[in-house]
Amino acid sequence: MVTIRPERSSDYKKIFVINKKAFKGEVEARLVENLRHTKGFIPKLSLVAVKDGKVVGHILFSIIHINTGSKFVPILALAPMAVIPEFQRRGIGSRMVREGLRNCEELGYKTVVLVGLPDYYPRFGFVKASGKGLSLPFEALDEAFMVYEILPNALQGIGGVIVYPPEFSEE
């Protein structure tokens, strides 16, 4: 049985290790730590997966913006999402994504973007973001940059460049 719940301060070190192991480095682990200290951090959208009392996964949704050229529209970024390697391919990541998207909707958010595995995220309703008029401020595969409209047609008439906070570019 896996339980998905908001992170607690007692989970911070475990979350660091999960991201470090899953991504084979500390970039994503430090990103999570840095984002906790920003205005875009939403405690209810930093979730952990717990199996048999052990924290085995983490997912984070945080506020970013679309620069439309005339205004900045707040949306969410899903980044990062990690499961300890020995617990991968057991549906834990999928549970975290689904629960996270439900929480995003409950909190009134309308759109989530990510740069991730093109074969993984479409099962949750993510589509190529370029098809919705969005672009990135850095190079990435078109198929890897995806968006999910929690509210159908939330991006109608809204296009532009994603603006990430500086924490996303720190290494």
Image: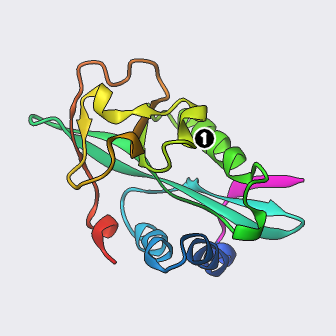
**Residue sitting at x 79%, y 53%:** 90
**Residue sitting at x 74%, y 53%:** 92
Quarter of the C terminus within the rendering = bottom left
Residue 3 covered by magenta stretch: yes
Up the image or down, 24 lies above or below 8; here it is below
Magenta highlight range:
1-8
Q: Is residue 84 left or right of residue 30?
A: right
Residue 140 covered by magenta stretch: no
Q: Quadrant of residue 127?
A: top left
- Local secondary structure at mark 1: helix
Q: Who is closer to the viewer here, 100 or 171?
A: 171
Question: Residue 83 placed where, x, y %?
Answer: 67, 63
Q: Is residue 146 left or right of residue 123?
A: left
User: How many numbered discs?
Assistant: 1
* Residue that label 1 marks: 103
Q: Is residue 163 left or right of residue 61?
A: left
